[in-house]
Image (spheres, grey):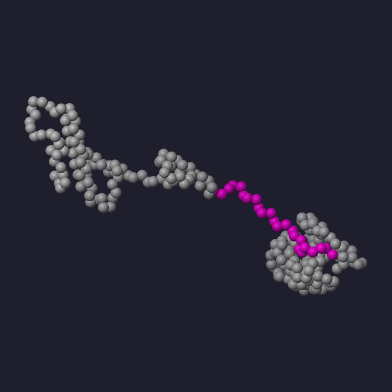
Amino acid sequence: MTSGSITVKELLGGVTDEPRAKHRLATDSTDKFKGMAGVAVAAGALLGTMAQAAPAMATTDLGAEGISDSVDHPAPAPVATPVAAPFGLAGLPAELAGPLAQAEQIIKDLQAVPSAVAPPAAAPAPAVLPVGGEISSAYGSRWGAFHYGVDIADALGTPIQSAMGGTVIEAGPASGFGQWVRVQQDDGTIAVYGHINEYYVQAGDRVNAGDVIAAVGNRGQSTGPHLHLEIWDQNSNKIDPVAWLADNGVITEQRWGTD
């Protein structure tokens, strides 16, 4: 008996202390007695269990199950670790959440494996027209001599772009051109940019097609601002720059004139 306990008599309610030697309780009274007696036993077991577990309750949560009215109390079953919501779907029952979580992990593992097929290599940058002006003098015979390049007239100071990627092999003064830039191009040819006003690269620099390397000038033997462009093949033979540009996808329009 503890503080707040109730007596068996109080649990039995209508059952009296008078002897009943000659007859049994009525059926409803018997059922009532058995039910209340069971409640008393369960209550006693609960109080006993809680008294034994009191020292550990400060640090341990009791589950909803694990309380027994038997003498020996087995250790409570471990609490299952909550299953993470697969694919962002929360609240799924364990029998669905488990397989879906496995499927989600398999998909993540497959996505992490690099593809066996290497992506195609990026295509090299195409050739570009160094300046946007019009051709004033073509490759070939001119004034009783041979003109080994093509002249493209444009405004003084217009940016000159590298026709193709390559390495600068010379930038500076040049006889007849005043100043020039020469680039060893990736296809083995050499591009010569003459009569330039100023240059922005130096020997050893790596340039790409479209990089600005100089500015249109009127230096050297020149009658007006223009770019003199030459292309030398792998044997240092000077070839038609217009044909070379066309072979590399750059089509030009000509306007005949004088240098």
Q: Is residue 196 left or right of residue 142?
A: left
Position of residue 33 relative to residue 149, above or below, is above
Is residue 254 shown to the viewer in this render?
Answer: yes
The outermost residue toward the right is: 144
Q: Quadrant of the N terminus?
A: top left
Which image quarter is the C terminus in?
Answer: bottom right
- Is residue 174 in view from this perspective? no
Q: Is residue 121 magenta?
A: yes
Q: Which residue sits furthest front?
A: 14
Residue 81's spot in the image, x, y percent? 37, 46
Q: Residue at x 51, y 47 (%)?
A: 108
Residue found farthest to the top: 22
Residue 75 at x, y percent in the picture: 27, 43
The spot of residue 4 in percent (x, y) is 16, 46
**Residue 246, above or below 50:** below
Judge whether residue 128 is colored magenta: yes
**Residue at left offset 70%, top offset 62%:** 208
The main secondary structure of the magenta stretch is: loop
Q: Position of residue 95 (x, y in %)?
A: 41, 39
Q: Residue shown at 17%/33% (left/top)?
A: 33
Magenta-highlighted residues: 113-136
